[in-house]
Amino acid sequence: MTVPTDQHKELKKDVTFRIFRFNPQVDSKPYFDDYTIPVERGITVLRSLNYIKEHIDASISFRAFCQAGICGSCGMRINSLSQLACTTQVWDVLSKSKEHGVIKVEPLRNLPLIKDLIVDMDPLVGKMKHYSNWVDSTMPEASMGKKEFLISEQEFLRYDKATDCILCASCVSECSILRVNKEYVSPAVLLKSFRMNVDSRDAIHEQRLAELVKDHGVWDCTHCYRCQETCVKSIPIMDAIHGIREDAIESRGMKDTSGSKHAEAFMSDIEKKGKLVEATLPIRTNGVLWTLQNLLPMAVKMIIKRRTPPPPPLVKSAKGIKIFREMFREMTEHVKQDHKSHKK
Amino acid sequence: MKRYAYYLSCINESMTKEVDRSIELWQKELGVEFVKLHEGTCCGGSNLDYVSPKHFALVNARNIALAEKMGLDLIVSCNTCLMTIRTAKKKLDESPELKKEVNEILKKEGLEYRGTSDVRHLLWVLVDDVGLDTIRQKVKVPLKNYRIAPFYGCHILRPSTVLGHDNPVDPSSLDQLIEALGGQTIPYKHKNRCCGFHTLLVAEQESLNVAAEALQEAIEAKADFIVTPCPLCHTSLDGYQAKALKNAGIESSIPVFHISEMVGLALGYSAKQLGIKRHIVG
């Protein structure tokens, strides 16, 4: 028997799909079923699932519709990575399989399971509603349908990428914070909120932003970039999250929430010393009481291990700080000018 | 002796001093010299970029320009500093207008950002420049009795459009380093997951739970220790470990090492010399 050196050269082979099964009405716990089928090169995971359902086991449940990467229905975890079954080639995932010839298919994470590969999208829809993720038009109702509501190309480019989202929930499935707290807003919701908040036709920017800065909102994102990395449309989701934060700081000030206070500390420390003053960061973010209640036991351990960050007077400024500060302030003037011309 | 400009991360100058201390011990032995960039400033820690994108560009153009002036690549030993400075570099390289604006200001200090120096992680230097074969030859005390959980952290992997060294889904460089030092890597699902550091002061419970999951997997897999290339991940997994595990109802603990310490151990330095005794978890 000859072993092919490049499996991409093979045109057809037997592939095992190890599919997550769980029917809460019948099963006491989830399990996996293996289905081995002949697959030709060029076939997607979705077509393979359709084949299994049609020819081997009609009881498998999954959601799919357009089969062309447009509707976002067939999001699932294929070999542990959240993606669309309809745009994922069997040959591509097979080359990265941990177990030779086996592709593991599981439902998306961080959403309630309905059956097999189907998750309940209602919590996501509910969050979209909670954060008012639609354009609440500034156009008087009487004028609607009578005239166009134009926006500039420059404005559209700011949220062009965000409009590519097809709500497949792959980013939701990969989110580090949702994994530990299902109340968290979710990357897809933040992306949509960003898209609505930069739209000049929208009338509820302030109201939406006020909701976004609350607990479980935009400041709870931990910058892990898993959402962006997994996005099936390659949308820079973190840019949108940072965009909301930038907007929140500009519209609501830097003393608004612990998140904005934390961010402000970086800006002011860099200007003053060129270095972060870590010792006072918890106090500046959350106040003295929170710091004492939450960090005192750890602070004691750190003192014993001589691990505490130095107090502010002992944080040495970066070498050449004087000229650095001048340059930093010159850039502050540039930013002020930008804001003036932006407002015009 | 290959020379590099070495970026001083704020955390390594305050809480995790053992990182730079351990690198100093072995750098010459591995044929590399890291020249400390005392003029460098804080990168903005993944926060300045949205507080003020233009200050973010200026500060990091300057950090890179300082290395360019020396004709050296800039080496970073903190994942977030790495991602942040590389993000700024990408923005500057893609926008001639931003580069021009920043350079107008940098003139004051006689600096210019040209885009000629690369920005790389210490781990990449060890694996790609020093090379695994050289490392294998230099090992004096192989870590052969240790089962090691490799925790890469986020900002050495993602966004891959900015980092691009390892496959973010299945990274391998840290595994390779462990094996070159004679250690045994364990299968570790959390290897490319998050430590929760960036929200420790803003969403503490969530962050602690994120950290606890990573610790729990390593404990259950009976790893002897976790190793990470990032001092922020180290702070979350070591400094906050007791709190995270208590929170999750887990009665156990696991040591967490920096890559610089792990290299030092294999080269025969003692835990005391490497500063390992400064860790919160012994």
Image: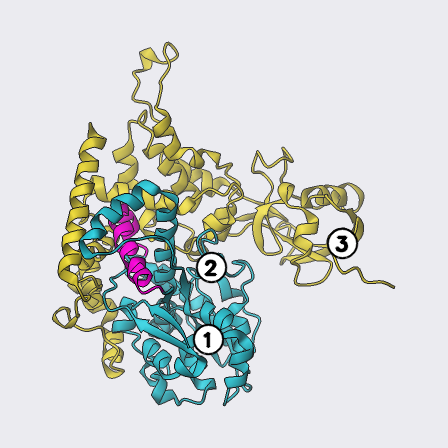
Chain colours: A yellow, B cyan
Q: Label 1 vs label 3: CA separation?
A: 36 Å
Give above or below for B65 relative to B20: above
- Classify mark 3: residues with Cα within 10 Å, few (<14), some (14-19) or many (20+): many
Give above or below for A85 relative to A135: below
Question: Could you say whether the residue bearing mark 2 is in a helix, strand or loop?
Answer: loop
Question: Could you say whether the residue bearing mark 3 is in a helix, strand or loop?
Answer: strand
Say which residue label 2 marks.
B157
Say which residue label 1 marks.
B226
Query: x and y percent of residue A143 in the render?
Result: 33, 11
Mark number displayed over residue B201: none
Depth order, front residue of B198/A292: B198
Question: Could you say whether the residue bearing mark 1 is in a helix, strand or loop?
Answer: strand
For the record, the magenta segment spans B46-71
- Quadrant of the snapshot with the C terminus of chain A: top left
View extreme (top): residue: A146
Say which residue label 3 marks.
A15
In percent of the image, x 59 and y 50: which residue is there?
A107
- Classify mark 2: residues with Cα within 10 Å, few (<14), some (14-19) or many (20+): many
Q: Label 2 vs label 3: CA separation?
A: 30 Å
